[in-house]
Amino acid sequence: MVHLDGLRETHDYVCNRKGVFDKAHRHDQEGKDLGYTIFLNTTVYRETKVEEVEGLCKMIDELRAAAS
């Protein structure tokens, strides 16, 4: 289970740790490369812009397509 609470800037801000988005993204890919099924958990906050949610969904779709 990997959690992404938005794209890089938002996720790192919410987690209060710079670089955790990249770490989560890297671990997602490593898990797929090892043959694991990966689940993504996302919290969308009231302040999140619709464009960011769309961007996150697009990124997730691209990850899914790359795993096929």
Image (cartoon, rainbow, N blue to C red):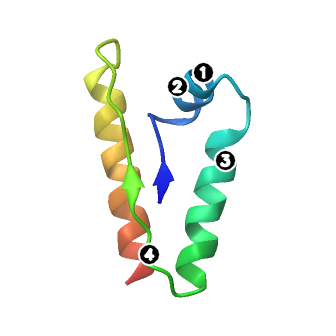
Which disc number belongs to residue 10?
A: 2
Q: Nearer the viewer, residue 62 or 21?
A: 21
Mark 4 or 2 closer to N-term? 2
User: What residue appears at the point 73 percent right and 30 percent down from the top-left corner?
Assistant: 18
Amino acid carrying label 3: it is Asp
Report whether 7 appears left or right of 65.
Answer: right
Amino acid carrying label 1: it is Tyr
The residue that mark 3 highlights is: 22
Mark 2 or 3 closer to N-term? 2
Q: Nearer the viewer, residue 1 or 33?
A: 1
The residue that mark 4 highlights is: 66
x and y percentages locating residue 13 in the rendered image: 60, 21
Amino acid carrying label 2: it is Thr
x and y percentages locating residue 3 in the rendered image: 48, 47
User: What residue appears at the point 45 percent right and 35 percent down from the top-left corner?
Assistant: 5
Say what secondary structure mark 3 lies in: helix
2 and 1 marks in contact (CB < 8 Å): yes
Which disc number belongs to residue 13?
A: 1
Marks 4/3: CA distance? 17 Å
Amino acid carrying label 4: it is Ala
